[in-house]
Amino acid sequence: MIRKKIVVFQGGLGNQLFQYAFLSKMRDLGYKPFYLNHASDSHNGFEIQKYFVTNMKECHPIFYSIFRYMEKLYRHGAHFVFSTEKYFSVRKIFQCGYWQDLRFLPNGEIVKFKKLSLDENNKRMIDIMNSSNSIAIHVRRGDYLLPPHNKVFAGICTKEYYQKAINIMKQKLDNPKFFFFSNDMEWVKANIQLEDVDSYYIDWNIGDKSVFDMYLMSQCKGNILANSTFSFWGARLGKNNIVIYPKKWFNTMEPPNIFPSNWIGI
């Protein structure tokens, strides 16, 4: 069996973190994994190496040409050319998927942030988070409301979901402070009502600075997730006391098997 494996990185930062976890798992199993960067033109590009401490090597340039040819075959129905979640095989050289399953995640710490250069707004939020029962709430709308994503993701994390999760946090923690992260903060302020608690709206980490939202989420003592891999990693990278996630993750398929047993699904 060929021990060299090429793990294809694609999608946004949340997906890239799952792909890096899978690459680490392949190394733990005794393979020699390399990465192929297919994420340069998506979202904010290949962010994982820019913001995280990683241990991986890039594949030889010739594999990019081979991948582009095989990708054309795949689009024409030749699903056997890649190993994917649905057609997983360690015999294949190209491992091309999102790997959202506990069986593809290594045990223990997977990855950690590099030392980030924070602006004064983010430093101030971290000071408050560290000194309180801080709860990060991620609300993803934006692209989730537009075709084709709306069929898969829209309408799941409703205001009722967030209100129920907030009530659970209030029952479990004394004097919680809530920190909102969203690409639609106007909707958040209009639809999620908080009484008698401190709330903060982090709306300045825009575009390629969105990684700072993930970092701030990881600093909180609890998390309320959206149905988003970005949201998942904001919680997974932290040392959180309580994490609440939506049991329904997709409209079109079963939820991924990615959640630790101590997280709360509602």
Image: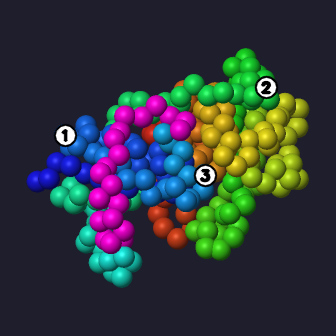
Between the residue at mark 1 and the residue at mark 2, the CA separation in whole angstroms equals 44 Å
**Relative horizontal placement of residue 6, taking residue 172 as reference (left or right):** left
For residue 180, what is the image quadrant?
top right
Image coords of residue 179 (percent x, y): 75, 36
Q: Which residues are magenta?
A: 50-71
Which residue sits at x=82%, y=50%? Answer: 185
Task: Work out whether mark 1 precedes mark 3 in sequence or the reverse, and give the earlier one.
Answer: 1
Between the residue at mark 1 and the residue at mark 3, the CA separation in whole angstroms equals 32 Å
11 falls in the magenta region:
no
What residue does disc 3 label?
44
> Which is closer to the viewer, label 1 or label 3?
3
Give the numbered dot on residue 120.
2
Task: Work out whether mark 1 precedes mark 2 in sequence or the reverse, and give the earlier one.
Answer: 1
Total marks shown come to 3
Image coords of residue 46 (percent x, y): 51, 49
The amino acid pointed to by label 3 is: Asn
Identity of the residue furthest to the bottom in this view: 76
For the N terminus, the image quarter is: bottom left
Identity of the residue furthest to the left in this view: 1
Image coords of residue 104 (percent x, y): 34, 47
Give the numbered dot on residue 92.
none
Residue 37 in the image: above or below residue 107: below
What residue does disc 1 label?
30
The amino acid pointed to by label 2 is: Glu
Between the residue at mark 2 and the residue at mark 3, the CA separation in whole angstroms equals 23 Å
Between 9 and 169, the one nearer to me in the picture: 9
